[in-house]
Image (cartoon, grey):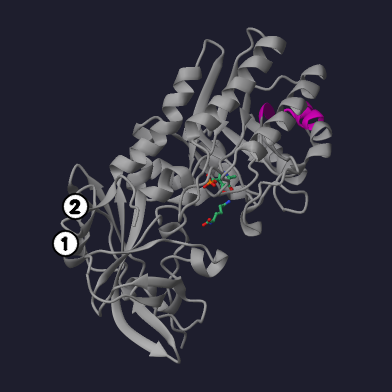
């Protein structure tokens, strides 16, 4: 079985950067999310380093980590110290970025349903830019900025109608999706925005989907953004940045996603040629919103087998993690590799790995050939993105604890939730 660089076996025991997972399970219990700081920073630097190579006096860039993929404060803090900006989709995420000690002026705010209080909060904290997703939202931002005596920086999230060729639930750039402003209406929208006294039009953006293995759809989307940029320039509306969103995929099983350096080289190649030909001397910033490609393969979910059972002719390994801890398999039928923490040489069987929740959809992996016994530990791999971040308290299950490994030391970066905490906000009426 293939393991990634930061998740490897030593003496037949799976480790995160050399820290054995059986020891962590003993100390912190299961289910447990375990992340590698080294993997996280390495993935971020894959973006930041290539961006730096293409920096010139008038081509700049900002990598805005997509907070929704994994929003633990420790993770945000590490990325902030690496120089990341942040892509957020709620006031809560903005408060997380601030609580993590990161700079709110490097925050971009996406999302179709920004409330008035979220817009106010973002303006109070002087965020870099709103990625506006409708005309109604634009007008609301202008009104609130006027009340606050401010000018809001905005970019339009245009919907380029490009097929990202990924799971339909995580496609966001097709006409029928709820996201963004239709491409054909963007020009008129920008003209309206440019006339608004409390709006400063600064950019253009899109985000066409997630877990893309090929960058061709992203390059196609970039062409469309560039085209709109040119049309706007002809109307005297000068943009300062282009944000191509996130979406680069990772290996869950044996997929081979485009290398980030190749993708960025193609993006900057296009931008440099176009900008130097048409806008020499004008400053342009390229922005990115990666989530999964930074956090996804920086973490795993550790779980313990509670029972083995056979119904009809199907074998089940019932573990203590469930769909409330990792929702992706139930939601998208997605694949996560399952590895034994301690390798056994005994007979293998084919198992469905399921949780204790009262739903047939509560499974983490299906039809996996493993040699396991009751009480064994299993690692659900590639769970650093959209794992803990999408977890819930269904069945009154406290969320898992989170551990970060840094330089062979384990840090508890989120305590396990206790049942009392789950009902602490509830009241019995007389
Ligand atoms: C607006 C926006 N930006 C960035 C991302 C991050 O995407 P990914 O994790 O695929 O890089 C998402 C999630 O798909 C998103 O909705
Ligand atoms: N939550 C999804 C990705 C959606 C990204 C949000 N726009 C996943 O687990 O793959």
Residue 338 lies in quadrant: bottom left
Q: Quadrant of ligand 2?
A: bottom right
Question: Do we see residue 150 in this rendering?
Answer: no
Ligand 2 within 8 Å of disc 1? The answer is no
* Disc 2, SS: strand
Residue 205, horizontal then vertical, whole percent: 65, 35
Q: Which of the two residues, 176 or 8, is positioned nearer the viewer here?
A: 8
Label annotation for residue 34: none
Which residue does the image show at 66% across and 46% down from the upper left? Answer: 164
Q: Residues within 10 Å of mark 2 (few under 14, many from 20)?
A: many
The N terminus is located in which quarter?
bottom left
Residue found at the very far top of the displayed protein = 281
* Position of residue 145 in the picture relative to residue 8 (left or right): right
Assess whether mark 2 and mark 1 are in contact (beta carbons under 8 angstroms).
Answer: yes
Label annotation for residue 19: 2
Residue linked to disc 1: 23
Residue 167, horizontal then vertical, whole percent: 62, 57
Residue 397, horizontal then vertical, whole percent: 38, 75
Which residue does the image show at 17% across and 67% down from the upper left? Answer: 26
Q: Which residues are magenta?
A: 190-203
Q: Which of the two residues, 215 or 356, is positioned nearer the viewer here?
A: 215
């Amino acid at each position: 079985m293939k393991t990634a660089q930061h998740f490897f076996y030593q003496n037949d025991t799976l480790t995160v950067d050399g820290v054995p997972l059986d020891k962590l399970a003993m100390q912190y219990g299961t289910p447990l999310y375990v992340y590698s700081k080294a993997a996280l920073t390495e993935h971020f630097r894959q973006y930041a380093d290539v961006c730096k190579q293409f920096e010139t006096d008038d081509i700049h860039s900002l990598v805005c980590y997509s907070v929704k993929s994994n929003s633990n404060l420790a993770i945000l803090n590490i990325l902030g110290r690496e120089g990341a900006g942040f892509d957020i989709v709620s006031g809560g995420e903005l408060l997380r970025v601030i609580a993590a000690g990161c700079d709110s002026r490097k925050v971009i705010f996406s999302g179709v349903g920004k409330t008035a209080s979220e817009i106010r909060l973002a303006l109070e904290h002087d965020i870099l830019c709103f990625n506006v997703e409708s005309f109604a939202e634009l007008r609301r931002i202008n009104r609130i900025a006027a009340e606050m005596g401010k000018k809001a920086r905005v970019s339009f999230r245009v919907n380029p109608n490009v097929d990202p060729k990924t799971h339909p639930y995580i496609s966001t750039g097709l006409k029928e999706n709820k996201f963004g402003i239709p491409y054909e209406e963007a020009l008129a929208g920008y003209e309206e925005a440019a006339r608004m006294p409390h709006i400063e039009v600064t950019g253009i953006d899109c985000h066409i989907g997630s877990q893309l293995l090929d960058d061709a759809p992203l390059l196609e989307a970039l062409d469309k953004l560039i085209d709109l940029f040119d049309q706007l320039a002809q109307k005297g509306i000068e943009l300062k940045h282009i944000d191509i969103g996130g979406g680069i995929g990772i290996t869950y099983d044996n997929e081979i996603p485009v290398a980030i350096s190749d993708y960025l080289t193609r993006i900057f190649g296009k931008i440099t040629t176009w900008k130097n030909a048409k806008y020499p001397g004008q400053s342009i910033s390229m922005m990115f919103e990666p989530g999964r490609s930074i956090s996804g393969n920086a973490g795993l979910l550790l779980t313990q087998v509670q029972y083995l059972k056979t119904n009809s002719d199907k074998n089940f390994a019932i573990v203590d993690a469930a769909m409330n801890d990792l929702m992706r398999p139930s939601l998208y039928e997605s694949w996560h590799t399952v590895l034994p923490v301690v390798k056994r040489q005994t007979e293998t069987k084919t198992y469905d790995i399921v949780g204790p929740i009262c739903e047939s959809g509560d499974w983490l992996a299906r039809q996996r050939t493993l040699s396991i016994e009751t009480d064994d530990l299993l690692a659900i791999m590639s769970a650093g993105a959209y794992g803990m971040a999408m977890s819930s308290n269904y069945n009154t299950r406290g969320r898992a604890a989170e551990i970060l490994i840094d330089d062979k030391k384990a840090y508890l970066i989120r305590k396990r939730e206790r049942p009392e905490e789950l009902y602490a906000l509830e009241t019995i009426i007389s």
